[in-house]
Image (cartoon, rainbow, N blue to C red):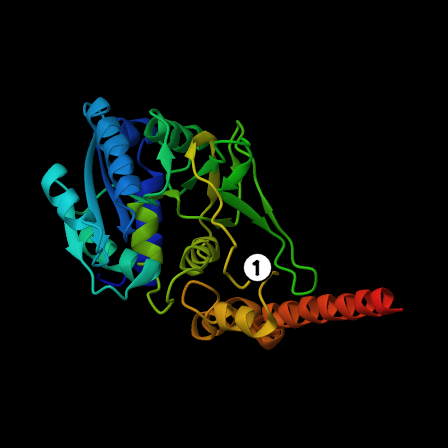
Amino acid sequence: MEKVSNESYEDFHVLLNNMNFEDWVMNKLKIAVIFTCYNRIEKTKNCLEKITKQGKKLSNKIELEIFCCDDNSTDGTYEMIHSRFNSVNLILGTGNLFWAKGMAKAIEEAEKSNPDFYLMINDDVDFFEDALEIMLSSYDSVQDRYASIVGSTKDKLTGKLTYGGIKWDKKVIHEKETRIEPRFPCVKCEQTNWNCFLIPSCVYNMVGTIDDYFEHSMADYDYSNRICRKGFPIYVAKEYIGYCSRNSIAGTWQDTSLGLVARLKALQKKTGIPPRSSWHYCKKYYGIFAPLVFIRPYISIVKRSLILHLKSERNDRNFTG
């Protein structure tokens, strides 16, 4: 993608500020829907069915084009998409891309279509039938063409907020990240999960593509930070857009039933907090405090394991005594 100079950046802002907002949003919008998938065929099928149905429903207002990177699924996902959703732009991965690199591949293909918006989604979201309308009406309501919109999901059983927009206090010690419930008027946030995230092309063209240096997670938080650093706002959509349960911590580095060594190994997996990605993120956003933030999860694991060990020893002494 061609880089934009500072002069072009300022000219671009002047040009858009002189445009009539209502005229701009009332034109038929071209939206590139982007996701990556691997070995969850039923969830992928459900996601595509929900999104394509909504695209047809809103076809007088929007033109939806879907871009998917299947990371060499072995459960028939690629073949299912190819046969049942043949309008999807399908990219085949290597089997070792994971989330960030898979999204990068799909985004690279989507750029060629020159959309008005990029809609980043996860295929494990069970989208409500009006999810796209909620996202677009939320965008319209904030009256800022540079605004990105993050959709919130909730657990189907508990109704509790699971993914969406996050308020980040940027502290190194006692850092706090607070998930924001959807409401109207829409509320600003600093960080986002990409379960459903709408980015105007005017913002994307200034921020650039996802950083595929990341191996799996953190790339969505990184992109949100980059948007905010450019001075563009992010809002939480006014209503929930679907169901999505939190990922299970069983077998992960957060699983306290595992031993110390097992947790440390899980932490360093691509699906955990791999050192390469973690250090890349910490250097970007914590400056001289990067080493301290980098070692925090390691300290947390060791501290928790030590506490459990001491409790176990005390219980053993009480039992034998």
For the C terminus, give its image quadrant: bottom right
* Quadrant in which residue 263 is drawn: bottom right
Residue at 78% from the left image edge and 71% from the top image edge: 313
Q: Is mark 1 on a helix, strand or loop?
A: loop
Q: Is residue 136 left or right of residue 59?
A: right
Q: Nearer the viewer, residue 250 or 135?
A: 250
Q: In the picture shown, does residue 11 fall above or below 179?
A: below
* Quadrant in which residue 107 is drawn: bottom left
Residue located beneath label 1 in the image: 255
Q: Which of 11 and 157 is in front in this view?
A: 157
Circle 1: residue type: Asp
Residue 120 at x, y = what percent? 33, 46
Residue 27 visible in image: no
Residue at 31% from the left image edge and 47% from the top image edge: 202
Q: Nearer the viewer, residue 182 or 246?
A: 246
Extreme residue toward the right, this view: 321
Extreme residue toward the front, this view: 320
Residue 160 at x, y = what percent? 56, 35
Q: In this view, does 47 lie to the left or right of 240?
A: left
Residue 142 visible in image: yes
Residue at 31% from the left image edge and 50% from the top image edge: 12
Q: In this view, does 284 lie to the left or right of 136?
A: right
For the N terminus, give its image quadrant: bottom left
Q: Nearer the viewer, residue 315 or 264?
A: 315
* Quadrant in which residue 106 is drawn: bottom left
Instruction: Give the tally of numbered discs.
Output: 1
Residue 294 at x, y = what percent? 56, 72
Residue 58 at x, y = what percent? 24, 24
Q: In this view, does 220 lie to the left or right of 254?
A: left
Q: In the picture shown, does residue 305 fall above or below 188?
A: below
Graded by Cα atoms within 10 Å as few (under 14), some (14 to 19) or many (20 or more), the crowding at tag 1 reads some
